[in-house]
Amino acid sequence: MLKFMDLQLEKEEQEAEKEKARVWLNYLTAMFTQPSYGKEDPKLTQARNDFIKAIQPKQEHGPAKVYDWDFELMKRLQNPKEGRLMNGDG
């Protein structure tokens, strides 16, 4: 019974941490996305740009990379006895 209560407490603590992170991100988003009126501190401008860059989704550049895999080598590495027999090494 104590184990169940301990697991339930851990689950609730994790949920609370997630909620705190969500609230903090919402706060940062609100702070850094407000339009500035008048002269703004250059450090704040740089921080705003860094924040926006950090939360933007990553964009892929160009086509996806295609790799040539040596499947026979992978089979031999996974099962060395069969690999030797297949190659005639054993």
Image (cartoon, helix red, strand yellow):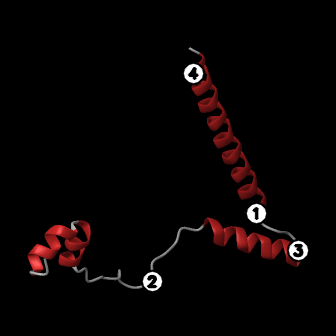
Whether the residues at callouts 1 and 2 have beta carbons within 8 Å, the answer is no
> Which disc, if any, is residue 61?
2
**Three-letter amino acid code at the position of disc 1:** Phe
Crowding around mark 2 (Cα neighbors within 10 Å: few <14, some 14 to 19, many 20+) is few
Work out whether mark 1 precedes mark 2 in sequence or the reverse, and give the earlier one: 1
Work out whether 30 lies above or below 41.
Answer: above
> Which disc, if any, is residue 3?
4
Crowding around mark 3 (Cα neighbors within 10 Å: few <14, some 14 to 19, many 20+) is few
Residue under label 3: 40
**Three-letter amino acid code at the position of disc 4:** Lys
- Which secondary structure lies at badge 2? loop
- Which secondary structure lies at badge 1? helix
Q: In this view, which residue lies farthest toward the front?
A: 90
Q: Quadrant of the N terminus?
A: top right
Question: Image check: 32 left or right of 17?
Answer: right
Question: Image check: 81 left or right of 52?
Answer: left
Image coordinates of residue 56 in percent, x first then y, are 59, 68
Work out whether mark 3 precedes mark 4 in sequence or the reverse, and give the earlier one: 4
> Which disc, if any, is residue 13?
none
> How far apart are labels 2 and 3 at the CA level?
33 Å
Whether the residues at callouts 3 and 1 have beta carbons within 8 Å, the answer is no
- Dividing the picture into quadrants, the one containing residue 84 is bottom left
Work out whether mark 4 precedes mark 1 in sequence or the reverse, and give the earlier one: 4
> Which disc, if any, is residue 32?
1
Q: Quadrant of the C terminus?
A: bottom left
Image coordinates of residue 79 in percent, x first then y, are 21, 66
Mark 3 or 4: the one toward you: 4
Observer-nearest residue: 78 or 7? 78
Work out whether mark 2 precedes mark 3 in sequence or the reverse, and give the earlier one: 3
Work out whether mark 4 precedes mark 2 in sequence or the reverse, and give the earlier one: 4
